[in-house]
Image (cartoon, coloured by chain):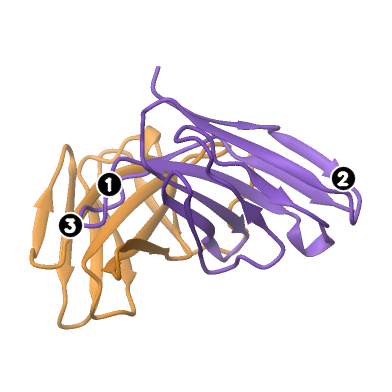
Chain colours: A orange, B purple
Amino acid sequence: GESVGLHLPTLSVQEGDNSIINCAYSNSASDYFIWYKQESGKGPQFIIDIRSNMDKRQGQRVTVLLNKTVKHLSLQIAATQPGDSAVYFCAEGLFSGGYNKLIFGAGTRLAVHP
Amino acid sequence: EAQVTQNPRYLITVTGKKLTVTCSQNMNHEYMSWYRQDPGLGLRQIYYSMNVEVTDKGDVPEGYKVSRKEKRNFPLILESPSPNQTSLYFCASSLAGTADPLEQYFGPGTRLTVT
């Protein structure tokens, strides 16, 4: 598959454990945040988004937490499975001047071990 | 099946030889975008389009051109490719307008090598 990040930070977890992937963002004016998952050899896939006026949002097996005080975002994955192994990107979005802009972080690799 | 398609998937070319990477989506999305992905740098936006005939620069537009003559197609043009444009390229589309999070659907990627 394609190598999307030779020197990415890596989080290693055991199958069945919960995973927490962290992200620091830079722009306090960001309107929303998104988490994307990228499996080897594929394009990124949307997981979940959260608007800046929210602190927490839950999806299927995933929870995103937003702490605007310290500009920190996290993605929690419950009962991590081998299929969760991928690179995870956080992205911050901004509505401005009639456009919609998204800036991606560098990514974190999640490795799930049996 | 709802999808974003890109062609070619792999391309090796030489410096200065014009090339086009095609992108097409069948979801009637208004928003389309091109990104390049390089190791350790994440995804960087090259150009985006909010609708037909409306395009704008992203973060790294130098050396690239785009056009949006139809809603479904958004080709990426490299008029005179250089080795620093060797990268993995992704096209994406979204139904989102200017007030919704960009839930983008990505194509499978095009691996470009410029020698």
Kindly identify which numbered label has been placed on residue B13.
Answer: 2
Using residue B6 as the reference point, say whether residue A93 is left or right of it: left
What is the C-alpha distance between the residues marked 1 and 2? 35 Å
Answer with the quarter of the image where residue A89 lies.
Answer: bottom left
Q: For the residue marked with disc 2, what is the amino acid?
A: Thr
**Is residue A59 shown above or below A101?**
above
Q: Report the Cα–Cα distance between label 3 and label 2.
A: 41 Å
Q: Position of residue B70 (x, y in %)?
A: 50, 35
Q: Amino acid at mark 3?
A: Ile
Callout 3 environment at 10 Å: few (<14), some (14 to 19), or many (20+)?
Answer: many
In the figure, residue B20 lies in which quadrant? Answer: top right
Q: Which mark is residue B96?
A: 1
Name the residue: 79% across, 39% down: B11
Tell me, yes or no, whether the two marked residues, 3 and 2, touch with CB atoms within 8 Å. no
Label 1 Cα crowd, 10 Å radius (few <14 / some 14-19 / many 20+): some
Q: Residue at x 65, y 55 (%)?
A: B65
Image quadrant containing the C terminus of chain A: top left
Left or right side of A22 for B64: right
Q: State which quadrant residue B94 falls in.
A: top left
Q: Nearer the viewer, residue B98 or A50?
A: B98
Location of mark 3 (residue) = A50
Question: In which quadrant will I find the N terminus of chain A?
Answer: top right
Numbered disc 1: secondary structure: loop
Q: Is residue A93 above or below residue A69?
A: above
